[in-house]
């Protein structure tokens, strides 16, 4: 699966995807491609979503890489949820999702000037 072969018009690229194309080194792109190795595109729209909506697809790839690294077993027999896993005799499911900016937020994460990786956004947190 080649994440960086355009599947949509450039005008429809998500700003985070566009930033990777414009600002990333080949090593960073190779890392993302390596994360996707063996990842099945069960609904034949993953690359388009990676290029157009980005965040949830990026998170899904990251989780896939983590689960692979820890040698979880994958069951891809069903279209959803995102991950049907087993590990050490335990079965569980994971739905990869992201919290987008709140309706009252003025700025998207790709437009913020501060270091967003060191700032918690309580509006994006799910609490139980």
Image (tube, rainbow, N blue to C red):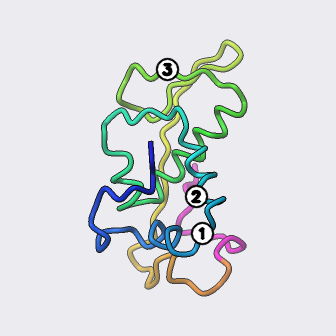
Lateral position of residue 63 relative to residue 17, left or right: right
Residue at screen point 54% across, 23% down: 74
Q: Are marks 1 and 3 in contact (CB under 8 Å)?
A: no
Residue at screen point 44% across, 59% down: 54
Confirm whether the magenta stretch covers residue 57. Answer: no
Point out the stretch of residues depicted in magenta.
116-128
| Measured Cα–Cα span from mark 3 to mark 2 | 27 Å
Confirm whether the magenta stretch covers residue 123. Answer: yes
Residue highlighted by disc 1: 24
**Placement of 121 over or under 86, stated as above or below:** below
Residue at screen point 53% across, 68% down: 20
- Location of residue 79 in the rendering, given as x and y in whole percent from the top left corner: 35, 29
Residue highlighted by disc 3: 75
**Placement of 89 over or under 11, stated as above or below:** above
- Location of residue 12 in the rendering, given as x and y in whole percent from the top left corner: 30, 69
Q: Are marks 2 and 1 in contact (CB under 8 Å)?
A: yes
**Observer-nearest of 36 and 127:** 36
**Observer-nearest of 61 and 88:** 61
């Amino acid at each position: 699966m080649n994440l960086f072969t355009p599947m949509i018009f450039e005008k429809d690229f998500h700003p985070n995807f566009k930033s990777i194309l414009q600002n990333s080194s080949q090593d960073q792109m190779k890392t993302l491609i390596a994360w996707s190795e063996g990842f099945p595109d069960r609904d034949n729209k993953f690359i388009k979503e990676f290029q157009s909506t980005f965040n949830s697809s990026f998170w899904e790839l990251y989780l896939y890489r983590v689960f692979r690294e820890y040698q979880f077993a994958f069951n891809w027999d069903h279209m959803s949820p995102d991950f049907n896993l087993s590990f050490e005799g335990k079965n569980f499911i994971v739905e990869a999702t992201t919290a987008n900016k709140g309706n009252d937020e003025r700025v998207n994460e790709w437009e913020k000037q501060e270091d967003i990786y060191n700032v918690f956004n309580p509006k994006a947190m799910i609490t139980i």
